[in-house]
Image (cartoon, rainbow, N blue to C red):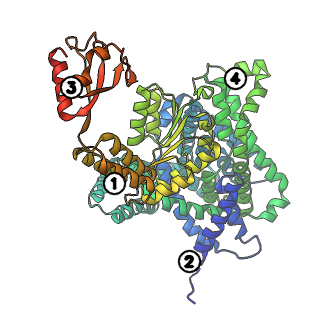
């Protein structure tokens, strides 16, 4: 057997991560918890198979690069600018106080000042992944409170990148201030950023555009990987700055290209895979025995992260003119630490500022806070109620009137539309004109902004991969419309919706013939396949052009739809519909005519007009004041503006049209 240690370690790490992630999700925890526990399971401090830490950590470096590239790709100065009044000063103050608390706690434990500083910085920054998932799952991401939390996190990302740049300088100076080294480090970082933003903003989007025109998906993906890894390595080798900064800047530059969404989609699998390996490698460094022996330190640090950071944020509400709920949401969202903390801790470990046991404490705090964080959101209503019982405190905290949010109690008999692409937009336009209440669930922030400008209720998030659908009140909805083209996501949404409301009418979009069947089996009442629907429409219009009656053509089309677009005539209903088409009388037509003021019908009753006796055509319907009357009675009197439906042969309808239009008496 070939000796393939790299393959063995990758395979084992991914398998245990998969098992850990599945278990975590099944019990309602973020998958990161499962990945960290998987790393502990194959680490050197637990019995059983021990993975090669060096091998997995080298692969984890790729995870760091792709994570930071993703942060840069979704980095938005606009998000930060929109909430700059709270996010910039709030993030700076919260980071400073959290760092001081962490530093103070470390000094009680006898750590070195530099180790304490790394600890404080590591616990001061929150996880992007955990925050966004928590906000989406609790229907908060597209609210003013969620936007404030996101802007706050953007500012923390900037601070974290700056810390990664400066950390080697402090390590080299052994804690003493060296202005020359600091200045050189900042100049190198500034030079790299300047070159990238002046030259890179022209070169990288241009390069991606050229590669896109080759129409080769493989070359496009290779170009993205080359840009990501090449920029990160260039930053490290040529400018002496971290790989993380290089990857972050590359992502921020490419985010300005109109191809950024495609870049994010193509890089998604690489980022997720190597990020998992990164989290596994982090878990491998945790020593459970040390943590058990130092449980007091673990609990203290965990409480500081979960409650200490939250209290800091809540108290800051006294000094900012924002609703109290904004600070409660931000406090809960940021009461955890994650990937940036791991990266900062690993930086401190590689620079010998921390030892492995000290790093284990940071990881333990992360594990505790990430595990607890989903439950913190559940405490929001209770926490708000308790604070309201302290009138003086709440009045000062709630310094501004609440910003209007979605009134969920008014979501009754509404249409829930998932996806605001071309199909979803058309659906929204029609329902808006008809004044039908609706709620749109969309995962694209720009589309959410557009919908909010139209005053249309929205929920931000991925309905197939989060708890956001639970907030759509499907139990009170009139119909669910799933317009997204991704068949797997649509299937998950339909399954979840059917569990929430077994009687809810569901209209879903399928991308394949198999998808039509699967979605129907999962509970969709009507499944639409755009391509097959187009083919059916062609059959529909062809049959009409051949002179077949509209009603019979429509019945045939509906029979095909009912049988999931099966054009092979197999069912009794389709046989019957097709037979009726074949034997239907082809000379019958229907015409709608509007009565002008000079029409000979105006002022006469249907009996007086005696239309059938004179022309052979019959009146089958009348539309007046938007009210349709089928088979009008003989005493019905015709009025100006009435639209009258006539049925008859072509010559008979031509006679009626001529008589009505020229005012000749009947």
Residue sticking out furthest to the bottom: 1
Mark nearer the N terminus (4 vs 2)? 2
The residue singled out by tag 4 in the image is: 397
Q: Residues within 10 Å of mark 1 (few under 14, many from 20)?
A: some
Mark nearer the N terminus (4 vs 3)? 4
Label 4: which secondary element: helix
The residue singled out by tag 2 in the image is: 7
The reply to whether dot 1 and dot 4 touch (C-beta < 8 Å) is: no
Spatial CA distance of label 4 from label 2 is 55 Å
Spatial CA distance of label 1 from label 4 is 47 Å
Q: Residues within 10 Å of mark 4 (few under 14, many from 20)?
A: many
Spatial CA distance of label 1 from label 3 is 74 Å
- Give percent across and percent down for residue 23: 70, 60
Tell me what residue is drawn at x 69 percent, y 45 percent.
374
The residue singled out by tag 3 in the image is: 615
Spatial CA distance of label 4 from label 3 is 81 Å
Residue sticking out furthest to the front: 613
- Can residue 243 be seen from the camera position used here? no
Label 1: which secondary element: helix
- Give percent across and percent down for residue 482: 49, 44
The residue singled out by tag 1 in the image is: 204
Viewer-side label of 4, 2:
2
Tell me what residue is drawn at x 63 percent, y 30 percent.
326
Label 2: which secondary element: helix
- Give percent across and percent down for residue 323: 63, 24
Give the quadrant of the N terminus: bottom right
- Give percent across and percent down for residue 152: 57, 37
Tell me what residue is drawn at x 29 percent, y 53 percent.
206
Task: Using the image, determine if residue 148 lies above or below residue 546.
Answer: above
Mark nearer the N terminus (3 vs 2)? 2
User: Based on the displayed image, in which of its 4 quarters is residue 51 positioned?
Assistant: bottom right
Mark nearer the N terminus (1 vs 2)? 2
């Amino acid at each position: 057997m070939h000796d393939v240690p790299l393959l063995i370690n990758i395979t084992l790490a991914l398998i245990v991560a998969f098992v850990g992630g599945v278990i975590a999700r099944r019990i309602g925890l973020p998958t990161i918890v499962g990945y960290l526990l998987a790393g502990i399971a194959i680490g050197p401090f637990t019995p059983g198979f021990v993975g090669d830490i060096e091998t997995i950590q080298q692969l984890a470096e790729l995870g760091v690069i792709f994570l930071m590239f993703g942060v840069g790709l979704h980095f938005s100065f606009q998000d930060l600018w929109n909430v700059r009044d709270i996010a910039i000063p709030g993030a700076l103050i919260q980071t400073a106080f959290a760092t001081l608390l962490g530093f103070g706690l470390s000094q009680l434990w006898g750590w070195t000042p530099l180790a304490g500083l790394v600890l404080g910085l590591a616990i001061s920054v929150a996880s992007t992944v955990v925050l966004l998932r928590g906000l989406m799952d609790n229907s908060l991401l597209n609210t003013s409170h969620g936007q404030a939390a996101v802007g706050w996190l953007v500012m923390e990302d900037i601070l974290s990148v700056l810390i990664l740049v400066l950390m080697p300088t402090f390590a080299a100076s052994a804690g003493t201030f060296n202005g020359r080294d600091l200045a050189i480090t900042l100049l190198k970082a500034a030079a790299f950023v300047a070159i990238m933003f002046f030259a890179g903003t022209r070169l990288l989007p241009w390069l991606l555009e050229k590669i896109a025109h080759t129409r080769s998906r493989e070359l496009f993906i290779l170009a993205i990987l080359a840009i990501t890894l090449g920029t990160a390595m260039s930053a490290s080798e040529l400018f002496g700055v971290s790989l993380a900064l290089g990857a972050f800047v590359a992502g921020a530059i490419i985010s300005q290209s109109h191809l950024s969404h495609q870049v994010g989609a193509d890089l998604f699998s690489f980022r997720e895979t190597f990020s998992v390996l990164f989290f596994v490698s982090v878990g491998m460094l945790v020593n459970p025995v040390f943590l058990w022996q130092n449980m007091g330190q673990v609990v203290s640090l965990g409480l500081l992260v979960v409650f200490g950071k939250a209290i800091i944020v809540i108290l800051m509400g006294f000094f900012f003119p924002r609703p109290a709920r904004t600070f409660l949401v931000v406090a809960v969202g940021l009461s955890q630490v994650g990937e940036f903390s791991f990266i900062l801790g690993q930086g401190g470990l590689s620079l010998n500022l921390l030892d492995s046991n000290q790093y284990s404490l940071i990881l333990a705090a992360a594990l505790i806070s990430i595990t607890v964080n989903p439950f913190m959101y559940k405490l929001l209503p209770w926490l708000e109620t308790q604070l309201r019982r302290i009138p003086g405190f709440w009045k000062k905290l709630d310094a501004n009137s609440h910003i209007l949010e979605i009134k969920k109690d008014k979501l009754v008999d509404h249409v829930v539309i998932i996806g605001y692409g071309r199909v979803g937009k058309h659906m929204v336009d029609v329902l808006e004109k008809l004044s039908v209440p609706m709620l749109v669930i969309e995962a694209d922030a720009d589309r959410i902004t557009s919908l909010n400008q139209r005053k249309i209720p929205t929920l931000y998030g991925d309905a197939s991969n989060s708890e956001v659908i639970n907030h759509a009140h499907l139990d009170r909805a009139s119909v669910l419309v799933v317009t997204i083209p991704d068949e797997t996501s649509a299937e998950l949404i339909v399954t979840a919706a059917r569990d929430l409301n077994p009687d809810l009418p569901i209209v879903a979009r399928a991308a394949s013939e198999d998808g039509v069947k699967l979605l129907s089996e999962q509970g969709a009442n009507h499944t639409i396949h755009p391509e097959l629907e187009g083919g059916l429409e062609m059959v529909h219009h062809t049959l009409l052009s051949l002179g077949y009656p509209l009603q019979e053509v429509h019945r045939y089309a509906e029979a095909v739809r009912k049988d999931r677009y099966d054009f092979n005539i197999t069912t009794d209903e389709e046989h019957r519909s097709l037979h009726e088409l074949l034997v239907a009388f082809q000379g019958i037509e229907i015409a709608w005519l509007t009565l002008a003021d000079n029409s000979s019908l105006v002022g006469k009753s249907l009996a007086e007009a005696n239309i059938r006796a004179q022309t052979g055509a019959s009146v089958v319907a009348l539309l007046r004041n938007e009210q349709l009357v089928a088979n009008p009675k003989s005493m019905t009197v015709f009025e100006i503006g009435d639209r009258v439906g006539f049925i008859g042969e072509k010559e008979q309808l031509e006679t009626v049209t001529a008589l009505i239009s020229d005012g000749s008496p009947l």
